[in-house]
Amino acid sequence: MNDLPLNPVADEDLVAYIDDELSPQQRASVDAALQQQPQLAARLELLRGSELPFRQAFDSLLVEAPQERLHAMLDNLTPAKPAAPGLSRRRFFAVAASCMLAGVLADRLFLASRTPPPNSRGWRGVVAEYMALYTAQTLENLNPDTDAQNHQLAFVGQHLGLPLDAERVNLPQPQLKRAQILEYDGVPIAQITYLDPQFGPLALCITANAQGTPTRGSEQRLGMNVEFWSTDRHAFMLIGHNPPDELRSLSERLQQRLPT
């Protein structure tokens, strides 16, 4: 790693901090940022304590990455901008692959996690840890048209026995970005993601209601606010950094539109 200060501190820098791969100057810079930014300290603890298999996920991406092109990119780096000593060829590929396949990485991490993380309960805890990996950059380049969104939503709805379309799930400010099927412990979970212009990633997640009893409530997980509710057949959660009152209003809008 070079000796330039790390500002702002990215997840890659936090991982290098955890792995003790930073120079003394960089480590001091991260230490100072951690003291001043409670949310950054929480992010560090999440990365340090997460049970998600980051190494295996990056290894699988490395296999799928266009390695010939990445080799050419690395070989063509000019002498004026040499690679940092701590940046190995393999690490370069991992970082490059993660940038190009950010959505795939997030999905692989979730799908590979087959047991609930510590200090969480059930599927909402797993979804919260998954969503904690999202940033605005994860979603900002996803811009499918309405037809593509309806196709995604219809596919997701088929897996859950729940009719879904863009009209039912659109929200006033957060922009609908993607709908996909994930899986936890063999049970499908629909994830419908949005990007709020002010508060960042937001997700509506739906799964079968194993309890069969309608519920409703609010909670916080990993610094995010959650509204959850259920019908006889399905359990829902809306999770993001939106303020509790705003999130409750959005959840009520969705409850009015979604089929029961």
Image (cartoon, rainbow, N blue to C red):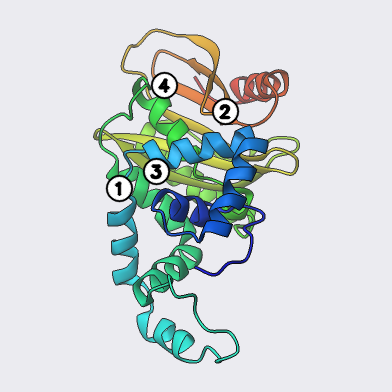
Q: Which amino acid does label 2 sit on?
A: Gly
Q: Which of marks 3 and 2 is in front?
A: 2
Q: What residue type is labelled 4?
A: His
**Which residue was labeled with disc 2?**
223
The residues bearing labels 4 and 1 have C-alpha atoms spaced at a distance of: 29 Å
Q: Which of marks 4 and 1 is nearer the N terminus?
A: 1
What percent of the width, then of the height, locates residue 98? 45, 63
Give the SS element for disc 1. loop
**Which residue was labeled with disc 4?**
234
Residue at 44%, 9% in the rendered image? 214
Contact, mark 3 vs mark 2 (Cβ under 8 Å): no
Q: How crowded is mark 4: few (under 14 residues within 10 Å), some or many (20 or more)?
A: many
Give the SS element for disc 3. strand
Q: What residue type is labelled 1?
A: Pro
Q: Which amino acid does label 3 sit on?
A: Ile
The residues bearing labels 2 and 1 have C-alpha atoms spaced at a distance of: 22 Å
Give the SS element for disc 2. loop
The residues bearing labels 3 and 1 have C-alpha atoms spaced at a distance of: 20 Å
**Which residue was labeled with disc 3?**
181
Residue at 45%, 37% in the rendered image? 46
Q: Which of marks 2 and 4 is in front?
A: 2
Q: Quarter of the image holding residue 114? A: top left
Contact, mark 2 vs mark 1 (Cβ under 8 Å): no
Residue at 43%, 50% in the rendered image? 106
Q: Which of marks 3 and 1 is nearer the N terminus?
A: 1
Residue 132 appears in the figure: yes
Q: Which of marks 3 and 1 is in front?
A: 1
As drawn, 13 above or below 96: above
Q: Which of marks 3 and 2 is nearer the N terminus?
A: 3
What percent of the width, then of the height, locates residue 32? 63, 44
Q: Which of marks 2 and 4 is nearer the N terminus?
A: 2
Left or right placement of residue 56 versus residue 155 in this view: left
